[in-house]
Image: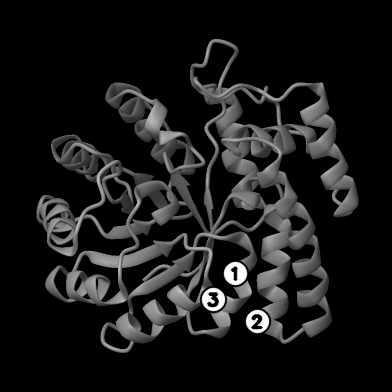
Amino acid sequence: MFKGIFSPVITILDQEGKINFEGMHEHIDYLITNGIEGLLFLGSMGEFFAFKQEEKKEFIKFAIEKVNHRVPVLIGTGGTSVEEVVNLTQFAEDEGADAAVVISPYYFKLDDENLYNYYAAVAQSTKLPIMIYNFPDRTNVNISPELVLMLAQDFPNIVAIKDTVDNISHTRQLIHVVKSAVKDFSVFSGFDEYFIPNLMAGGDGVLCGLTNIVPELFSELFKAYQGGDFFKVVSSQKKISKLLSVYDVSQPFVAAIKTAVMLRGRTMIPMVKAPGTMLDEQGKEKVRSILVTANID
């Protein structure tokens, strides 16, 4: 159902930690202009975990209006409270979102029965297409291909998965198990460097953080892959490999990603929601050095 390069959009903030809507408008236009084919708001990169429900709703209304049907709008609605997840998903549907991206509950490690019940409750509450968000480093559970297949077969509006697993074998198994039975089910990689391996295994695309910094690089890579331009694929992949060091500059890595976006010309400050903090000058120079090493202006 969904294919291509999707971006988990950063949430640009002002000095007080409030959403900078003017800065967001600029960034949205920048991503779309440079080839991004779908936008996810309030994902991990968008710091969904740090916003109140009412703040999320205000942001959802804004994002859908500003994108204005130019590309699909996905909204991260997952969390630890089923009632809040259902409420936010229904709100996103009413506002005109194209899909909800739903991470599994975190803190306790859920078994397959409880995971099934969670996604069933959300799927039955809405007609909105749902993308499962599998991120075991954050949720302490790795959703199996067999469970994904069961959910996709039982609930027609569960149509995709973002597989943020640092192991292409898991994503490959998802593609084999799920897409062999539900052919239009979309499998996205959540790790930047697995975009091409995902496509080569029969997957559908990538939903990754570096797209905020270099959307044009991913667009060029995709076009090169589709056109059989092997040398361009290799050169673009090498740049991505060098840029991946940005993730190691800060924890959480959102501060480093935002700093890189700012250094590339966005009108913003790299403010992050508490308890995260902005990078100091030393951290900013590390990010700048990575951009130079990757030959990114």
Classify mark 3: residues with Cα within 10 Å, few (<14), some (14-19) or many (20+).
many
Classify mark 2: residues with Cα within 10 Å, few (<14), some (14-19) or many (20+).
few
Q: Name the residue located 71 percent from the left edge and 54 percent from the top edge.
A: 244
Q: Is residue 241 above or below residue 272?
A: below
Q: Name the residue located 48 percent from the left edge and 55 percent from the top edge.
A: 71
Residue labelled with disc 1: 194
Q: Secondary structure at mark 1?
A: helix
The N terminus sits in image quarter? bottom left
Q: Is residue 208 above or below residue 291?
A: below
CB contact under 8 Å: marks 3 and 1: yes
Relative horizontal placement of residue 109, taking residue 175 as reference (left or right): left
Disc 2 residue type? Gln
State the separation of the CA atoms marked 2 and 1: 16 Å
Q: Quadrant of residue 171?
A: bottom left
Q: Position of residue 218 (x, y in %)?
A: 68, 62
Pick the front one: 1 or 80: 80
Front label number (2 vs 1)? 1
Q: Position of residue 120 (x, y in %)?
A: 12, 58
Residue labelled with disc 3: 198
Q: Residue furthest top?
A: 16
Front label number (3 vs 2)? 3
Q: Name the residue located 79 percent from the left edge and 29 percent from the top edge.
A: 284
Disc 3 residue type? Asn
Q: Residue 226 has which mark?
A: 2
Disc 1 residue type? Tyr
Relative horizontal placement of residue 52, taking residue 38 as reference (left or right): left
Q: Say which label, 3 or 2, has the lower sequence index.
A: 3
Q: Secondary structure at mark 3?
A: helix
